[in-house]
Amino acid sequence: MSSFRARKIEKKKQEIMRSAATVLAEKGYNGTTMEEIAAKLLMTKGSMYYYFKNKDDLLYQCHQMIMEISLDRIEKVVNSDLNPIEKLRNALKGHILLATSEKSMFMVMGKPNQNFSDLQLQEILKLRRSYSLYFDKILTEGIEKQVFDHVDVKMVRMIILGALNWIQEVKSI
Amino acid sequence: MSSFRARKIEKKKQEIMRSAATVLAEKGYNGTTMEEIAAKLLMTKGSMYYYFKNKDDLLYQCHQMIMEISLDRIEKVVNSDLNPIEKLRNALKGHILLATSEKSMFMVMGKPNQNFSDLQLQEILKLRRSYSLYFDKILTEGIEKQVFDHVDVKMVRMIILGALNWIQEVKSI
Amino acid sequence: MSSFRARKIEKKKQEIMRSAATVLAEKGYNGTTMEEIAAKLLMTKGSMYYYFKNKDDLLYQCHQMIMEISLDRIEKVVNSDLNPIEKLRNALKGHILLATSEKSMFMVMGKPNQNFSDLQLQEILKLRRSYSLYFDKILTEGIEKQVFDHVDVKMVRMIILGALNWIQEVKSI
Amino acid sequence: MSSFRARKIEKKKQEIMRSAATVLAEKGYNGTTMEEIAAKLLMTKGSMYYYFKNKDDLLYQCHQMIMEISLDRIEKVVNSDLNPIEKLRNALKGHILLATSEKSMFMVMGKPNQNFSDLQLQEILKLRRSYSLYFDKILTEGIEKQVFDHVDVKMVRMIILGALNWIQEVKSI
DNA sequence: CATGAATGAGCTTTCATTCAT
DNA sequence: CATGAATGAAAGCTCATTCAT
């Protein structure tokens, strides 16, 4: 039973992560200080270490959080019984929605950090690959059902996601 | 008349910039130390300050260097008397070629640094805008000559360049 | 009348001290954290402050505890009606027994802590001196009764205790 | 050729080590701050890192330095053509002289630090063992030549060195 | 009484920058 | 021009201590 306390801690961690992501997205890992993150939440540096082992850990958990949300969403789309075109449309819509609503979180993912341990890195890349595979699944299904042209799936996926990534650079619409 | 000495210094500066870009691209601005850059060139930290006022200046000049090359190339394409389709093809080819041959330099441009002075930032954004405009010019010309569909120029340009940017993430083909 | 409650608290304090001594002996004062001590007893840091005013106090009381035991024992030996040789033998035996059975506690005494208040320091040194004096008494008595050679009492006592202290360094016999 | 520069650096390192030892001996590893060590030499914290990789490294090199001196001296005694009694006398004299003249350095050796890497620890223990062996050699030689009683060499050596160690506790003679 | 959470002071370490030689 | 050495500001992290619940 995830006790009341455990849930309260989880809430706080998420609060911190969201705040951290804002700064991290803007200034990058090395450009962001723990003090800055804490200050935004009217906390002190020291308190952060009650919730996260260290800076790397904080960033890592940010990665995990956003990736898990992303995966949850695209999984639902892929497993729905829409036709490939609708699936692709929804997947893109979801991606864009998340990329804009959780802009900071999303940008944090930009570059898996160098300081990550091998274990952490592996975990992140695994989730990343999962996400790509879901995308590929939609494309492949479309090709099989002949609603999409017979393209190089990986290449097309990269182009699409690359194009979408551009969104984050746009300051105002 | 740029004396012999001046030209020798310029050579050295470029050498440094290229080396710096390699590290900067990989580790980001704050993740890169002057020592690291210097070590790669068998120099000492101190010497670098003869060629560049400070770390920001070094990064700034890296930006300038690659942007100037980029602009030079696309300018030639735009002013050529090819048809829009050929122009776009060449511009993309040029972009990709540069993005791969000068990969590091290119990646450095990723995010204009926060430490830049307003003046520097303005200068960089100006060059950046110039580059975009050259692209837009090609697209606009194509639309006017009715060889391209009537699309939202800015949007299409962003999608194209966004897709191209994906290239840098690709490790091997 | 030391109430039931008071006695229960005293028990707990001793329990803590003994556990603390283990860690303190191994890692030294500054190398030991309150957390570590608490964890060993399945307590939380905070709880310790109910029993001890602060870290210094904890260490101080450790000192006191072991010194009081030591003094009790040697006092009995000195006041017994054994002959000097037997007294010395018993005193050494007692010292070694305590130094091995309460190894951690004993090692804690190694160096009176710098953080101690003058008052605490004085108290500790007083007990220490008492212990030395008991030893000297045995030696002096032996010399007077001409069962020991006529040696420099202090010097010999230091050599003996110094040699005994070596015991703690021995890992296995 | 150990250049002029190299020798100058070595001098400085020794100067730092000697100063560091003073504080380390008095306050222990964790109780000593880099700032304190630096201040004593009218340096700044930062400068110390030009000469030593980190705090552990500084302590480690202190260990090495005093051990090497100790070994040098006892080696000469052992290899001399004195008789065992004279050898033992000289070895003890040397030990005491060093323990008093380089009191701080000597005390630093008290406890091999916990933070040492396995490699460092091994190296230190090796030197320590060497020192013990030289002592044992003298004792063994004396026993063989029948100028010493037939005692347990290791035990006697530990008692002797233990007794000598007491010297450091003596504040004034 | 016990504890979870917060705090702040202090520590080690890094690094851009400077400057005498 | 180049460099060895020094500096100081700032960062990450630890931990004794406090206190509301």
Image (cartoon, coloured by chain):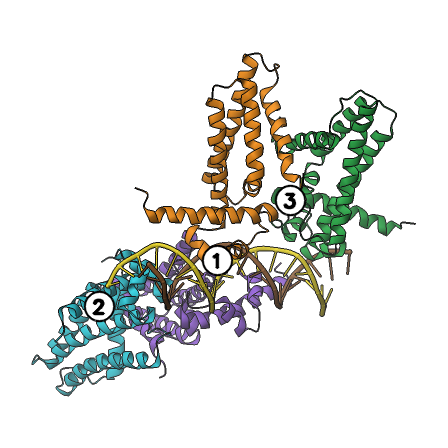
Chain colours: A orange, B green, C cyan, D purple, E yellow, F brown
**Which image quarter is the C terminus of chain C in?**
bottom left
Image quarter for residue C148? bottom left
Query: Dot 3: what SS?
Result: helix
Query: From the viewer's perspective, is residue B122 above or below residue D156?
Result: above
Foreground tag (3 vs 1): 1
Expressed as whole percent of the image width and height from the top left, the position of residue C105 reads 25, 66
Real-space Cα separation, disc 3 to disc 1, in angstroms? 35 Å
Expressed as whole percent of the image width and height from the top left, the position of residue C22 reads 27, 61
Query: From the viewer's perspective, is residue D2 above or below residue A65?
Result: below
- Residue at 67% x, 44% y is B111
Q: Are labels 1 and 2 on one chain?
A: no
- Residue at 70% x, 42% y is B109
**Mark number displayed over residue D149:** 2
Label 2 neighbourhood size at 10 Å, few (<14), some (14-19), many (20+)?
Answer: few
**Mark number displayed over residue A43:** 1
Q: Which residue is mark 3?
A: B23
- As shown in the figure, which amino acid type bears the numbered disc 1? Met
- As shown in the figure, which amino acid type bears the numbered disc 3? Val
Foreground tag (3 vs 2): 3
